[in-house]
Image (cartoon, grey):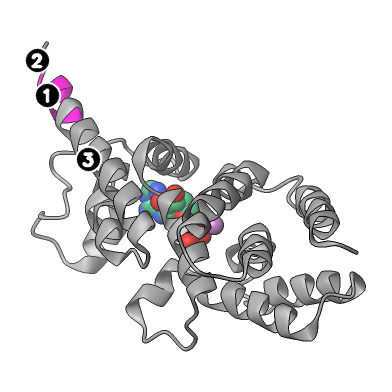
Amino acid sequence: MNNSDLIKKTIAFVKEKLNDAEGGHDWFHIERVYKNALLIARDTNCDLLVVQLGALLHDIADNKFHNGDETIGPKTARLFLESENVLENTIQHVIQIIENISFKGGNFEKKFSSAELDIVQDADRLDAIGAIGVARAFNYGGFKNRALYNPEITPLTNMTKEEYKSNNAPTINHFYEKLLLLKDKMNTETGKQIATERHRFMESFLSQFYAEWEGMR
Ligand code: ADP
Ligand code: NI
């Protein structure tokens, strides 16, 4: 099978699998990450097939929805790729991407590194910032029934971590805890450039938000 047929089959497989996924990780998240990854890959020396498969399969089974079992995503991806007779080297690389892409990986020493992982990770991070990032954050906060904003519970509020958590921190706080930090974590030059623009948009969103909160016109 040629690569373009393999990509078409992978797209069909992922769409099918994510049919009932929640809004933050549905097929359209995958499609946006795939497009971001292609954009970054154009400027970077890489194995394009690995980037494409990595982007398409990176959230195939988000472990948060499988009782924390982190092996389901890699297993599902491997079974699929084997059934399509993909080269073992390619399969292994795609699995490494799936295992290492998570944001939480940012706090640990990365176990694996490659240009292809850098690209897919940047592509995934880009989907958490900018206008889409704002929409996803409030969608998530709504799902958890959180306040948009509470001037009494900010990341600077003098509370213990436990108090802060049990207060179910409002969605605006997530910007300071994660979204505004992402631009400095980007791996690739193209990723950094796009992240800088999306970061500016979030800053302008936040200043407009506070102005409106105070009743300004
Ligand atoms: P990942 O893409 O690494 O799986 P998550 O599952 O943590 O990331 O988040 C999915 C989406 O939900 C992201 O856009 C993220 O910013 C958003 N999100 C996660 N945690 C929160 C939170 N506490 N408040 C608001 N949005 C959140
Ligand atoms: Ni993702």
Question: Please, what is the three-letter code of the amino acid marked with disc 1?
Answer: Ala
Q: Residues within 10 Å of mark 3 (few under 14, many from 20)?
A: some
54 relative to 85, above or below? above
In which image quadrant can residue 20 be found?
A: top right
Question: Please, what is the three-letter code of the amino acid marked with disc 3?
Answer: Arg
- Quick one: 88 or 83, which is closer to the camera? 88
Work out whether residue 149 can be spotted: no
Does the residue tagged 1 have its C-beta within 8 Å of any atom of ligand 1? no
Does the residue at mark 1 contact the one at mark 2 (Cβ under 8 Å)?
yes
Secondary structure at badge 2 equals loop
Q: Is residue 50 left or right of residue 146?
A: right
The structure residue drawn at horizontal position 53% and vertical position 55%, both measured from the top left corner, is 37
Across and down, in percent, residue 69 comes to 65, 76
Magenta segment, prevailing SS (helix, strand or loop):
helix
Q: Which residue is mark 2?
A: 216
Question: Please, what is the three-letter code of the amino acid marked with disc 2?
Answer: Met
Q: Is residue 140 left or right of residue 7?
A: left
197 relative to 187, above or below? above
145 relative to 173, above or below? above
**In this view, the mark in front (3 or 2):** 3
Across and down, in percent, residue 123 comes to 48, 56
Q: What is the magenta range?
A: 209-214
Q: Residues within 10 Å of mark 2 (few under 14, many from 20)?
A: few
Which numbered disc flags the more N-terminal residue, 1 or 3?
3
- Check residue 200 in the rendering and tell me which mark sits there, or answer none: 3
The answer to if 150 sits in the magenta stretch is no
Q: Which residue is mark 1?
A: 211
- Quick one: 117 or 149, which is closer to the camera? 117
The structure residue drawn at horizontal position 37% and vertical position 87%, both measured from the top left corner, is 109
Which numbered disc flags the more N-terminal residue, 1 or 2?
1
